[in-house]
Amino acid sequence: MKKKKIKAKIIVVSAIAIMLILVTVFADFFAPNDPYTTSAASIRLAPCLKYPFGTDNLGRCVLSRVLYGGRTTIAATFALVFISFAIGAIVGMLCGYYGGIFDKLLMRIADILLAFPQMVVAIVVAGILNGGLGGAMIALGITMWVSFARLSRSHTYSLKNQDFIKAALFAGKSDLYIIAVHIFPNILPPVLTNALTQIGTTMIGLSGLSFLGLGVVPPAAEWGSMISEARAYIQIAPWAVLYPALATVFTIIVFNYLGDVVMDYREA
């Protein structure tokens, strides 16, 4: 009974998450105005019929920029999580399966990276790379792969001594075959669950770097950079900060909750 309730939650939250993704993917269709068109006559207009979320300091439609900014933020987040997932899973499986010096070396590197706060490392690296979306993704990705690697390593280490792995070895199957066919499918559920929980954290990191001027560079629409641009005139046009901030918070809550309910489902 408990598992059915959790499954129903997963369906509802997944539907909301998919809707968010679709709205941002098809921002061209949903956006009421061009997000980059400036207008001296429409500077800092309060929300109205033509501009449902108002306008910013350059007269640009905030709703349109929120939609286009969501495309940038969500796409970059998913790309970074997927790349980190792929690198971490491969490294973890190789370390857990082969062990030895290779395992010790990579795990010590992982320990060193974990010794520093992720955002501190990201800010330093992004600063060295002179910002930009690509630089921000690299800056966060330097430490993101570690959690995936450690998780996949621990599961691989426990799996490699199982009878079905030994049977595959006795049957003459190659290491690559065993890792791809037997180990990877078995470690996928926990590592994939970890990936879902990383989406919200990654989104905060990317938006945070953009807010600091180390991520997406204006006038490109991105939620963190939009908040940073609008904070200078928050008292006279609070909507320019409020709506991208609400979009960020709501999206992070949705994906964090999705990760939590999937984890609960696995443990139920």
Image (cartoon, rainbow, N blue to C red):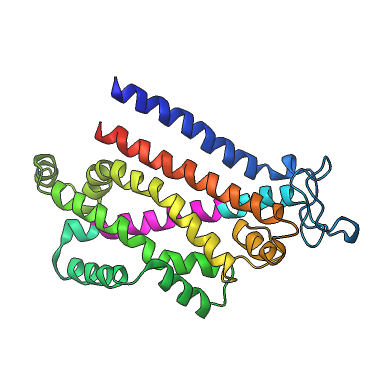
Q: Position of residue 101 (x, y in %)?
A: 16, 71
Residue drawn at 47 percent across, 68 percent down: 138
Which quadrant does the N terminus fall into?
top left
Name the magenta segment's main secondary structure: helix
Residue drawn at 25 percent across, 53 percent down: 151
Task: Please report the bounds of the magenta region as a residue range.
Answer: 74-93
Q: Is residue 150 visible?
A: yes
Q: Is residue 226 magenta?
A: no
Of all residues, the one furthest to the bottom in this rendering is 128
Q: Nearer the viewer, residue 202 or 145?
A: 202
Q: Position of residue 76 (x, y in %)?
A: 54, 56
Residue drawn at 63 percent across, 44 percent down: 25
Q: Position of residue 129 (x, y in %)?
A: 53, 77
Of all residues, the one furthest to the top in this rendering is 1
Judged left or right of residue 123, residue 179 is: left
Q: Position of residue 225 (x, y in %)?
A: 63, 63
Judged left or right of residue 17, residue 196 is: left
Q: Is residue 75 above or below residue 50?
A: below
Judged left or right of residue 78, residue 159 is: left
Residue drawn at 59 percent across, 69 percent down: 132
Identify the image quadrant of residue 218: bottom right
Q: Nearer the viewer, residue 14 or 152?
A: 14
Identify the image quadrant of residue 107: bottom left
Q: Is residue 216 above or below residue 22?
A: below
